[in-house]
Image (tube, grey):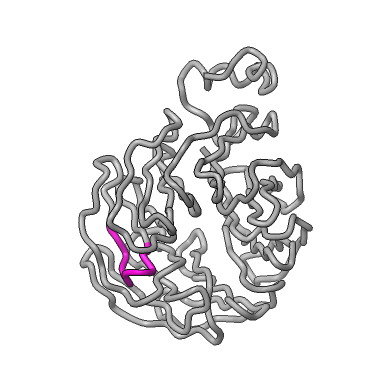
Amino acid sequence: MLDRRELIGLGLAAFPALVSGRWPIDGPAAVAFVTADTEAHVAVVALGARRVVQRVRTVEDPRSIERSPDGRWAVVGHAGAGAISVLDLRERRVRRVLRGFVRPRYTAFAPGGATAYVSDGGAGEVAVVDVPAGRVRRRIAVGDGARHLGLTPDGRRLWVALGSSAAEIAIVDPRRGRRVATVRPPFLAHDVAFSPSGRRAWVTAGREPRIAVFDTSTYALVRTLGADAAPQHVAFGPATAYVASGDGRTVRTHALADGRVVSRARVPSGSYNIQRTGARVLTPSLGTGALTLLTTQGKVIASIGVARNAHDACLG
């Protein structure tokens, strides 16, 4: 619970959330969870007050963090420690630590939030995790270097980039537990994300200022788009795509209909990862440790100091 001064800082509108123990993704009580890579914790940032209100201790090297669709859980990948943490977002604490990974990287949640898929680049696998139970159900062989991954909204296909600059993207049927196809993008790929309809996959580049858009049913290349400095990462709104370039220090907002750039914002150097939930767009900086908050139109609202380094973030 927050103390009296913190409650005042958040505003009286936060009171219902404090009583219920649930933090909405919008409004004065909204919070973000930000990984502090070199300090072994996840920072809880009150977005209304624009400051850190809690630090949740974790095992070393917390890098990636992904929120479940129901808002109850988050999975943190500790690449250097060979472990993942399951966070209870309502209680704001680590519920379980699962070891036995080689180099866990990123997470995609299945619809509903009980199942998570975690890429393990060192093992060339995707681990299927029962999140509430805190256990790995099985592992799917996908190929060396498994890193960024995206799950189609219907949960039927998982696209896994095989490396930071990947020549191939493995297409996996997660329900059957096997690789079913391969996509070879027109450049070395980095991030993979799906439009809200699930009909398009946006694939960013590891070394070039380009983005490739694929048809998810045929795997055909639909178009390529220009981008700022590689590598880039993507998040989506209902009609927009947000593309962060950490080395270019920008976030571009694209129209989904035709890919055109509708706005371009300056952000701190090292703002690589980006997420949108509700009316919040977040990008943390690995270089400066700041969390930048943007509007859904791609305009910067605030930059909040969080830690020495901040690799990833999600809404509570």
For the point 42% across and 53% down, the residue is 77
| Left or right: 194 in relation to 9 | left
Q: Which residues are magenta?
A: 119-128
- Closer to us: 279 or 169: 169
Question: Would residue 277 be visible to someone looking at this image?
Answer: no
- In the image, residue 124 lies at what x, y percent? 33, 72
Task: Please tell me whether residue 290 is drawn above or below residue 267 in the rendered image.
Answer: above
> Foreground residue, 261 or 287?
287
Looking at the image, residue 105 lies above or below residue 300: below
Residue 223 visible (yes or no):
yes
Q: Residue 70: where, in percent of width, then height?
A: 40, 40
Position above or below: 293 against 139: above
Say whether residue 97 is left or right of residue 90. Answer: left
Asked whether residue 127 is drawn in magenta, I would say yes
Q: Nearer the viewer, residue 215 or 54?
A: 54
At x 70%, y 67%, the residue is 247
Residue 239 appears left or right of 152? right
- Residue 81 percent across, percent down from the top left: 40, 55
Tally of numbered tags: 0
Most common secondary structure along the magenta stretch = strand
Q: Which residue is at a point 61% across and 71% down the rendered structure image?
A: 231
Judge whether residue 295 is colored magenta.
no
Front residue of 246/80: it is 80
As drawn, the residue found furthest toward the top would be 4
Quadrant hosting residue 107: bottom left
Residue at x-position 66% and y-position 53%: 285
